[in-house]
Image (cartoon, rainbow, N blue to C red):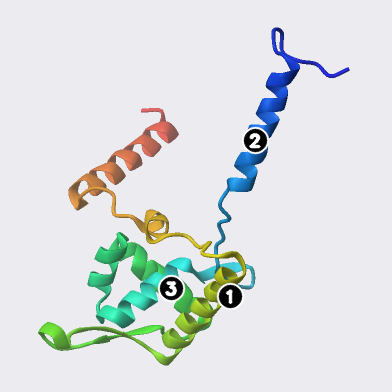
Amino acid sequence: MTSRPPGAHATQRGDRVQNALESIIAAQVKTKVWLALGGQFFAGDGGIHLLGGILRHGSLARTVREMGWSYRHAWGYLRRAERALGTPLVRTRAGRGAARGMELTETGHLLLERLRALRDRIDEALGPSGPTLDEVAARGRVRGNAASSVAARTSSARSRKTSRTGR
């Protein structure tokens, strides 16, 4: 015999199951694409937006503003991928004004092409299922202004010190 919460009718259970089934069928499939070497992540959906933005704008600063990432997060992302691959993905262009900026190296172009091809294959099979730009941006989002960020880190460091020393 199945147990029911007191006062629950058998039809209520059936309604809940039916509603759950409808929700499962209506659920949206979401996927992430990433590349790893030796089990370590080095590039994924965020890299598609980051490298594509650098290619489009010729500027890391403009790309991170568009993506909603912090400049520091983007540099860290690029450096991690470069360490994994053992070669630069980007190079800076010296100069003034529009001549100054950043461009993809041959490896950067190859990585962007590979990531886009993987994302396209998955989306062809499942429909658009990758994270939106807003979902990608949440990973490297700028939180508040620099002053509040420094204050938060300082406060956090004080809290850790206090918890270790008991003072």
Residue density around tag 2, few if under 14, some if 14–19, many if 20 or more, within 10 Å: few
Any mark on residue 81, and which?
none
Mark-to-mark CA distance, 2 and 1:
30 Å
* Three-letter code for the amino acid on which mark 2 is drawn: Ala
Residue density around tag 1, few if under 14, some if 14–19, many if 20 or more, within 10 Å: few
Question: Would you name the residue on which mark 3 appears?
Answer: 48
Q: Earlier in the sequence, mark 3 or mark 2?
A: 2
SS for callout 1: helix
Identify the residue at image location x=38%, y=77%: 51
Quarter of image, res 118: bottom right
Identify the residue at image location x=64%, y=68%: 39
The extreme left residue here reads 97
Q: Earlier in the sequence, mark 2 or mark 1?
A: 2
Q: Position of residue 61 (x, y in %)?
A: 23, 71
* Three-letter code for the amino acid on which mark 1 is drawn: Arg
Q: Is there CB contact under 8 Å for labels 2 and 1?
A: no
Q: Vertically, is 89 above or below 146?
A: below
The extreme front residue here reads 11
- Image quadrant in which the C terminus is located: top left
* Three-letter code for the amino acid on which mark 3 is drawn: Ile
Q: Position of residue 109 (x, y in %)?
A: 43, 87
Question: Would you name the residue on which mark 1 appears?
Answer: 121
Any mark on residue 20, and which?
2
